[in-house]
Amino acid sequence: MCLLAMPGHGRAADTDATQGMSREQAQQVLAVMNDPAKRAEFTNTLSAIASRLPSAPAAPAAAPKPAADALSVEPDTLGSDLVQDMGSLRGRLIVQAQHFVALFGDLVFVAHWTHTIFADPQSRMILFDAMGRATLILLLALAAEHGFSLLLRKPLLKVTERAVATERRLNLPDAPAAAPATGATTQDKDDAQVQQGDMQAQHATLRLLARVPYSLMHLLIKLLPVALFFALGTCFAYLLTTTHQAMLVTLTLTNAYVVARVVYLLMETLFVPHSPAIRLCSASDQTAFMVTHWLNFLVAAPSVVVCLSTLGGVFDMPARGTEAIIRSVVLIEHVLVAIFTWRVRMHVALALQPPARLRTQPFWMFLGRLVYLWWVPAMFFNFALWLIWATHIQGGYAWIIRTVILTTAVVILSRVLSVLIFNLQNRLFHVSPAMEARYPGLQARVNYYYPVSRKILSFLMFFASATLFLQALGLPAIHFLLHGRLGPKIIGAMLSVLVAYTVAIIIWEAANAALQGQIARFENSSQTGRASRLRTVLPIIKTVLLALIIIIVAVTTLSQIGINVAPLLTGAGIMGAAIAFGAQSLVKDFITGFFMLVENAIQVGDWVTAGGVSGTVEHLSIRTLRLRSVNGDLHIIPFSEVSSIANTSRDYNLVVVDFMIDLSQDTKQLCAILHEELEIMRKTPRYGHLIMSEFAFLGIEQADGNGARFLGSVRTAPGSKWTVYREYYSRLAVRMNNEGIKFPVPSFLNLLDNGPGADGLKVTATVPPATGPHAPQA
């Protein structure tokens, strides 16, 4: 504490104050006054003490005004808590404002201290001696560093040449991507582009990893001259200096230069303007040159900070002045960073643009325009860093540094993991030629699920990265997901839904593969009938299986997201029963159609007669049958109206030879004619494969006054009886006419009425004239 002396006591009061205060107490008071934070705290303490002291008796009029009583609030209420919080916030803001104002007041103290140092001859001599010797030592060390750098130029060139050779080897043209088929859809083309993009990203990552060893070698070679400078500067500081101040100044300047050079070389390793083959950052040569040029200015701040933090103590500058200079230098550094941010704003914006295939979408188009304003939050963040550090906000600067480091690590780690995971996905979704030959069409089926799996992996990567990012910001995201009340439920629901969909896809594809394999086995074993039957029923089986899978997965998903599925299942059961009772014919259609298809009663392309309609089967579903009749009409017949089916396209057909002959005709002669004409047809290429048997005489079915009914049959291929029938009868008409086969002649009775007075009824029989070679002559 400092003692306030009354003006009338003069030197006696000063003597009493000096006798009542020790040297240590005076140094403590001086330290408090030099430290802005402690000085502001001391001022607040005095203000609080003054507010609590009783008022002087001579000032009764200073009592609180009645209006002030109206602002009082009841204790332990919301109002009292609000007033207390607002008062605490007001006090913190006042302290931070005082700290900020004190920054500029301390610079006046620095100017006064400098004037004091140069006014003292002894202090001025010590300062000049220290700075002169330090400058001479640094010049010698810089000369040695430059000479050593010239000697190391050849090893640097060799490293660059090896990096270029490796780059050329990695830049060999890749195998051309499989071009999509001519009839490929837009989705297939997009999938191919996505896979090609993944391969390019993987190639770029591998190329970047191949550059790392050469970049490290380049950095180590360039660090060797800096190490030489550090060694010479440190040795000369102990050997060529005569005062303690000169040695400390030399060591301080040496350390500052080394810090600046190391920071510059570390940043230069990312860009390497003269060696693009070992550049770790994907930037153009122009950007690399500009960034490294600005680094020469930006790395000056760390060196100056190192100098001031040490030189202030060497020349007995109070901490108050040292901190003021350091804050000013850091402010200049932040201004330079802001100028640099403005210069590179367009380069960074172009680098942050989304891929070309996504720029047509509204969201990515908006995001692409938004990134052109990235420099606004960057500048705000830049000056906020300096303000937080300069005003001594507790933990502010440390929190920002920790957050930046952790978020950068999260971004890099997520990028590397995404490349590795997408590479693993590409390997899993690539079917080897041997596997494709064994299971034709497997690659196409696998590619069908590639976009979905990629989106799921992208979502999972985004979810994990967002969780780690929130954790890096200081939010307990991991604890929330693992030990909170809601987090484990979210994780469990996501895993359950993912497992359910995965199992459903595996079951679906396994069932399809099994059915297709069974059809192939039937066809290879000459069981074409069973293969055709299974192929006919295959759509129904797949539809039923797909419906079951969708229902199970939907119920699982709804139950995992918290929806009670019991009422839904009950309602679905009641609705199903109501539909079954109200649509019995529809149910009958499905049941009858299913068994018709299972029993392989009909197939597409068969000629059948069903529901009183004959025609070719064009389409089969589980409910209806579509027939195309001879006149071109399409008949759609529900299976509930099909009581029986006559299938003409199965096994074989019979051509029934049925006609009337005269009773005097020789049956053996006629059979011989029919047999000979059929054999002639069987020898022709067009009809030979359609006729499956010889002519079979079935006998005379009927004989009366109108003649004898001759019956025979010929077996033909399925669906070919009309072709054989028409050709066979056309040949028989010519042959029978030539052979003089007699057919019965129908007679017509004319009842003639001679009118009144006639003797009786006259009957006249009219016989048509006979034709043929044996017809009687007139």
Image (cartoon, grey):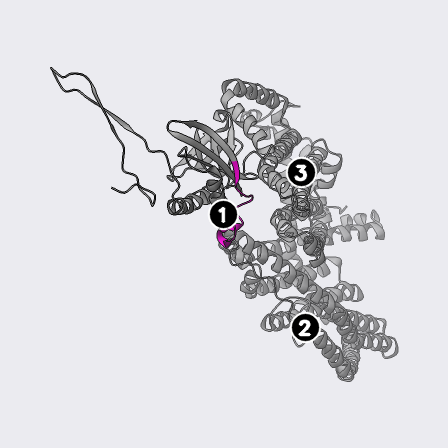
Looking at the rendered structure, which numbered label has been put on residue 272? 2
Q: Amino acid at mark 1?
A: Glu
Looking at the rendering, the stretch of residues picked out in magenta corresponds to 676-697
- Residue 548 picture quarter: top right
The residue singled out by tag 3 in the image is 504
Looking at the rendered structure, which numbered label has been put on residue 626? none
Dot 3, crowdedness within 10 Å: few (<14), some or many (≥20)?
some
Locate residue 118, reporting x and y percent. 72, 71
Residue 125 in sight in this render = no
Q: Residue at x 75, y 72 (%)?
A: 214
The residue singled out by tag 1 in the image is 676
- For label 3, the SS is helix
> What distance separates the C-alpha of mark 2 from that of mark 3?
52 Å
Mark 2 and mark 1 in contact (Cβ < 8 Å)?
Answer: no
Q: Residue at x 58, y 57 (%)?
A: 192
Residue 731 in sight in this render = yes
Dot 1, crowdedness within 10 Å: few (<14), some or many (≥20)?
some
